[in-house]
């Protein structure tokens, strides 16, 4: 096996690290960017007002009565299981055997804490400036060293920080507009095992790390045809990432050439999806407000992984598909100081049925949520929410040729659920 061929195979694997884990929205997107929104399953954020909705619509802060600040934290607790259902490996000899190892991985998806914060500054009755800091792609999956998935995934970790700077303007009593510039930092790590020629030899190891900044924009509008009805729309652009990193291969044994153990720099290019949100809030009376939203997510932008490195390049198809999510919810003003919420959301997976990996063991999801806001003082509002996410059972089905010329046919099942505990505060000044 030539060193160039080994580098090519490793390079293709490099950007799998961006698809780090099953999150609380489709694929590896985290939608926990508003505690108030969590309580109604994100059904009303694009049409709500204030800094708590800034991630969902930059027009949400237009015409605010006072400046505001928001901070929130979301604890995501995942209960998941992946099970081998006949995975095999064909080594160059050639001999086809089972992949071996532990057939069940319990809780490979790590629990995590997702923070977010924002601020909105009223310049005058029409103009406001805003800042939103979020972590939209942010989780970790880990499998044991002898897991059945080890040739596809051991550790996958992704950390992102998304910063939006926003300008919002009230055109008149019926129309608010907003625009924001986005900067996103991503830091990622990936490891997986590499099979040697003989099944009697210990596995080698492949590790990959990368990071980088990327930029985009967000625009939005809110239309108020009456005092009781608000219609909102927003668009968040795709993000073209370039991850500069290091690739290391170790533990490969003869008859594989010793030169196949190496470290090399590389760059991976991937595109994260655009998002289009439409929604409405209707205050039926002084107590009840109905919320509804539809979101289209452009996951087809994540169509391929494009890798360049010294001496070559490669392209690996991903074939994600665009999806549409639906959410409905209700707010109930129980008293002047207490607001109660509830909501439900349907969120289909963009991952392909053939090609789904252990790194993104995704399935269609249903989210059920409840929450509340307590007005502690005239200036301070405390938010809390609880949501339950049910993942539809799905199949892992992927065939890859490893950097050591073995063909791994990964076949397995995934099932699980998640609970999200959210708390936050909004302060006006």
Image: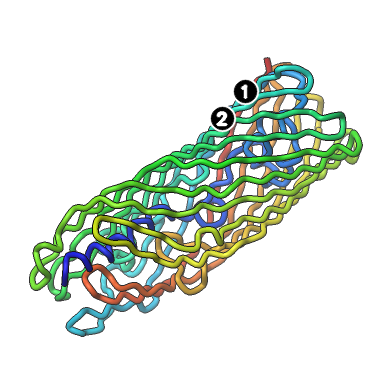
> Mark 2: which secondary structure?
strand
Circle 2 residues within 10 Å: few <14, some 14–19, many ≥20:
many
x 57%, y 62%: residue: 349
**Residue 193: % across, % down:** 25, 62
x 43%, y 55%: residue: 19
Relative placement, left or right, of 105 versus 418 is left
Assign the N terminus to one quadrant of the image: bottom left
**Residue 132: % across, % down:** 58, 31
**Residue 81: % across, % down:** 43, 62
**Residue 160: % across, % down:** 45, 41
Write down the residue under mark 1.
69
Q: Nearer the viewer, residue 425 or 405?
A: 405
Give the vertical position of 242 relative to 71 (above or below): below
Write down the residue under mark 2.
117
Give the vertical position of 212 relative to 307 (above or below): above
Label 2 vs label 1: CA separation?
8 Å
Circle 1 residues within 10 Å: few <14, some 14–19, many ≥20:
many
Q: Quadrant of residue 74?
A: top right
Identify the mark nearer the N-term, 2 or 1: 1
Residue farthest front in this picture? 311
Is label 2 in contact with label 1 (beta carbons under 8 Å)?
yes
């Amino acid at each position: 096996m030539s060193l160039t061929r080994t580098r090519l195979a490793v390079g293709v694997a490099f950007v799998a690290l961006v698809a780090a884990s099953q999150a609380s929205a489709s694929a590896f997107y985290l939608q926990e960017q508003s505690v108030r929104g969590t309580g109604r399953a994100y059904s009303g954020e694009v049409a709500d007002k204030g800094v708590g909705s800034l991630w969902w619509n930059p027009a949400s802060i237009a015409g605010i009565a006072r400046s505001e600040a928001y901070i929130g934290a979301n604890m995501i607790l995942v209960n998941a299981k992946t099970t081998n259902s006949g995975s095999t490996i064909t080594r160059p000899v050639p001999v086809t055997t089972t992949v071996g190892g532990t057939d069940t991985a319990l809780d490979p998806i790590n629990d995590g804490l997702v923070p977010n914060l924002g601020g909105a500054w009223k310049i005058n009755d029409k103009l406001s400036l805003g800042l939103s800091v979020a972590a939209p792609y942010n989780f970790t999956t880990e499998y044991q060293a002898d897991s059945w998935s080890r040739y596809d995934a051991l550790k996958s970790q992704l950390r992102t920080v998304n910063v939006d700077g926003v300008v919002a303007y009230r055109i008149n009593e019926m129309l608010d507009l907003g625009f924001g510039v986005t900067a996103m930092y991503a830091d990622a790590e990936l490891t997986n095992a590499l099979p040697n020629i003989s099944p009697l030899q210990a596995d080698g190891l492949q590790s990959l790390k990368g990071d980088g900044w990327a930029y985009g924009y967000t625009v939005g509008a809110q239309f108020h045809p009456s005092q009781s009805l608000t219609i909102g729309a927003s668009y968040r652009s795709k993000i073209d990432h370039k991850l500069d990193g290091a690739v290391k291969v170790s533990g490969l044994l003869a008859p594989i050439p010793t030169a196949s153990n190496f470290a090399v720099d590389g760059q991976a290019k991937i595109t994260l999806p655009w998002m289009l949100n439409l929604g409405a809030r209707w205050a039926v009376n002084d107590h009840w407000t109905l919320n509804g939203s539809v979101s289209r997510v452009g996951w087809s932008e994540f169509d391929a992984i494009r890798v360049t490195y010294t001496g070559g390049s490669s392209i690996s198809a991903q074939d994600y598909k665009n999806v549409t999510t639906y959410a409905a919810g209700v707010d109930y003003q129980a008293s002047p100081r207490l607001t109660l919420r509830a909501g439900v959301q349907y969120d289909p997976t963009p991952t392909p049925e053939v090609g789904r990996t252990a790194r993104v063991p995704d399935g269609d999801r249903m989210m059920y949520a409840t929450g509340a806001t307590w007005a502690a003082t005239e200036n301070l509002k405390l938010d809390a929410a609880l949501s339950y996410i049910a993942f539809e059972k799905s199949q892992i089905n992927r065939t890859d040729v490893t950097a050591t010329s073995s063909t791994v046919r990964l076949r397995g099942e995934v099932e699980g659920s998640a609970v999200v505990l959210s708390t936050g505060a909004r302060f006006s000044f």
